[in-house]
């Protein structure tokens, strides 16, 4: 996963390097001499654009042949993604009866212990063991939701950079161009998911609810790899991970707005993507269609950043909100699991610290999102969030702590993570947050009070002006 992602380069230095080595007379033209003639200083040339689009057609044809796929529906070719992901997985050990029994038993025990540590009831209705392939199949729907907004925005940005006359002429080729973008994005997605499928430990390992609602899942192959060198009994590690998965499931299944808010924040980030149109020039610089006969050359072509999205203030705000929400989720899970297992599993504290470092320093989750959408999925204030939840538990109790999740407006923000004492003081001094357990009931109560106040004012007005009701 070291290649620059589709649509996102690693740094501005990459662009400078490509510019310095472009050579020839084509300069920064997206399609060699054709691009220079079509969009260079000499003005727009429709004939040159026609040649340029024909060359793109040859490129698309070669890419489709090399990947063994045909037409696609939507902005991402998920058939390519799945194919490349499975190729990247290599040999996958099947799930054994012992794997399944270990996961089910560990989950049962974890749920029992969690009942005393949180007011949120069990969220998983079934607990299963997954292979990397199972993880890919069961999380693909969520990946589509995360990736489609980004791919759609990227696919449309290059059109915005064309002159109006070029847009009209390129109309018949739009489908072809979108198909090429879908192949490229699908290739990057497949490589990323193939790697991630071998590293994730549970269905919620990267913080987001990727799997089906109500299904708790552990991946035995990754758990076995993770366990090496930890000097903890394997059974304790499985119970610990099962408890983390169960805690995530409780939160995501009993806080109805949370799943939608997390995924919507990623979509909001995608909507803010803007592009420096000159970045597409690197994709076809000196392109030779015969290169597509060599799979390594195809991979190199797809590995180039076709666009250079620019970070906007809106994206920075969306990223801060996402990081804060992820930190709150991960911090809550850490506190609840530690409180539930601390006296029962001697290694629970050490395992919690291992997971904290794994999430906070950026592991497979960060790499995958940086590759797919240029977004680092990192809960940067995880330690602060855990400290806030722990202090709230100590000072206000489990009921008050879990009641904060009842409404998004009650959650702490990024500044509260830097000053947990102030947030806890507001919660403790602000009354029972359980008033927000039923927002609709609270809204109805407010409306009823307003109607009563209005009726009282009208009654008072009639008493002071008895003739006013008869006046026309």
Image (cartoon, grey):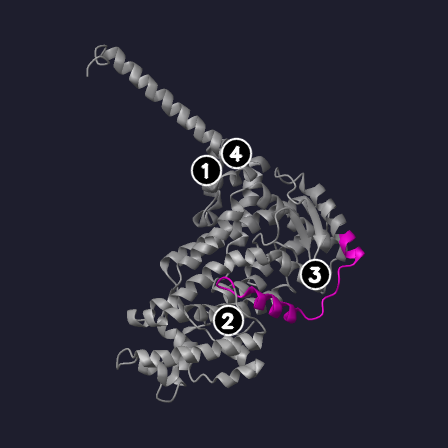
Q: Image quadrant for the C terminus? A: top left
Q: Position of residue 44 (x, y in %)?
A: 28, 77
Q: Label 3 belongs to which residue?
A: 131
| Residue at the spot 30% in from the left edge and 18% down from the top edge | 457
Residue at the outermost bottom position: 24
State the residue in front, 109 or 390. Answer: 109
Which stretch is magenta? Answer: 73-102
The residue wearing badge 4 is: 437
Q: Earlier in the sequence, mark 1 or mark 2?
A: 2
Residue located at (64% from left, 40% from top) = 117
Q: From where the camera sits, is residue 136 visible?
A: yes
Foreground residue among 295 and 391:
295
Q: Nearer the viewer, residue 203 or 87?
A: 87
Sequence-wise first label, 3 or 4: 3
Q: Is residue 448 rendered magenta in the image?
A: no
Query: Looking at the rendered structure, which numbered label has been put on residue 97?
Result: none
Q: Which residue is mark 2?
A: 184
Disc 1 designates what residue?
A: 426
> Which residue lies at the image location 46% right of the left edge and 53% below the top edge?
265
Disc 4: CA contacts within 10 A as few (<14), some (14-19) or many (>=20)? some
Which callout, 4 or 2, points at the residue further toward the start of the chain? 2
Q: Secondary structure at mark 1?
A: helix
Which class describes the residues within 10 Å of circle 3: few (<14), some (14-19), or many (20+)? Answer: many
Q: Mark 3 or 4, which is nearer the eye?
A: 3
Mark 4 or 1, which is nearer the eye? 4
Q: Earlier in the sequence, mark 3 or mark 2?
A: 3
């Amino acid at each position: 996963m070291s290649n620059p992602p589709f649509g996102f380069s690693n740094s501005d230095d990459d662009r400078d390097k490509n510019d310095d080595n472009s050579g020839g007379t084509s300069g920064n033209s997206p399609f060699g001499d054709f691009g220079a003639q079509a969009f260079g200083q000499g003005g727009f040339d429709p004939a040159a654009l026609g040649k340029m689009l024909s060359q793109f057609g040859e490129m698309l044809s070669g890419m489709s042949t090399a990947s063994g796929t045909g037409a696609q529906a939507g902005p991402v070719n998920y058939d390519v993604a799945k194919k490349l992901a499975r190729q990247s997985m290599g040999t996958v050990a099947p799930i054994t009866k012992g794997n399944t029994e270990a996961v089910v038993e560990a989950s049962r025990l974890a749920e029992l212990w969690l009942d005393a540590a949180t007011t949120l009831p069990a969220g998983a209705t079934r607990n299963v063991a997954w292979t990397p392939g199972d993880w890919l199949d069961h999380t693909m729907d969520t990946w589509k939701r995360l990736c489609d907004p980004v791919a759609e925005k990227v696919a449309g940005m290059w059109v915005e950079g064309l002159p109006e006359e070029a847009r009209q002429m390129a109309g018949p080729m739009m489908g072809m161009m979108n198909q090429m973008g879908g192949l490229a994005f699908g290739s990057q997605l497949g490589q990323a998911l193939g790697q991630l499928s071998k590293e994730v430990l549970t269905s919620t390992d990267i913080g987001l609810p990727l799997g089906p609602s109500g299904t708790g899942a552990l991946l035995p192959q990754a758990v076995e790899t993770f366990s090496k060198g930890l000097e903890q009994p394997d059974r304790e590690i499985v119970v610990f991970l099962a408890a983390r998965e169960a805690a995530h499931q409780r939160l995501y299944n009993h806080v109805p707005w949370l799943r939608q808010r997390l995924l919507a924040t990623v979509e909001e980030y995608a909507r803010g993507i803007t592009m420096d149109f000159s970045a597409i020039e690197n994709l076809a610089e000196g392109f030779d269609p015969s290169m597509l006969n060599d799979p390594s050359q195809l991979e190199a072509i797809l590995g180039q950043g076709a666009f250079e999205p620019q970070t906007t203030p809106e994206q920075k705000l969306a990223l801060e909100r996402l990081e804060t929400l992820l930190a709150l989720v991960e911090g809550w899970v850490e506190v609840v699991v530690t409180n539930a297992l601390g006296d029962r599993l001697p290694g629970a504290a050490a395992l919690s610290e291992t997971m904290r470092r794994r999430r906070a320093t950026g592991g497979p989750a960060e790499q995958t999102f940086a590759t797919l959408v240029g977004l680092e999925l990192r809960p940067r204030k995880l330690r602060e969030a855990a400290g806030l939840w722990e202090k709230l538990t100590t000072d206000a109790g489990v009921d008050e702590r879990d009641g904060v999740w009842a409404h998004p407006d009650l959650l702490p923000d990024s500044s509260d993570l830097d000053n947990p004492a102030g947030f806890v003081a507001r919660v403790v001094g602000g009354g029972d947050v359980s008033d927000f357990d039923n927002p609709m009931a609270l809204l109805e109560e407010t409306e009823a009070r307003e109607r009563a106040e209005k009726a009282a004012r009208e009654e008072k007005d009639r008493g002071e002006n008895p003739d006013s009701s008869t006046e026309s």
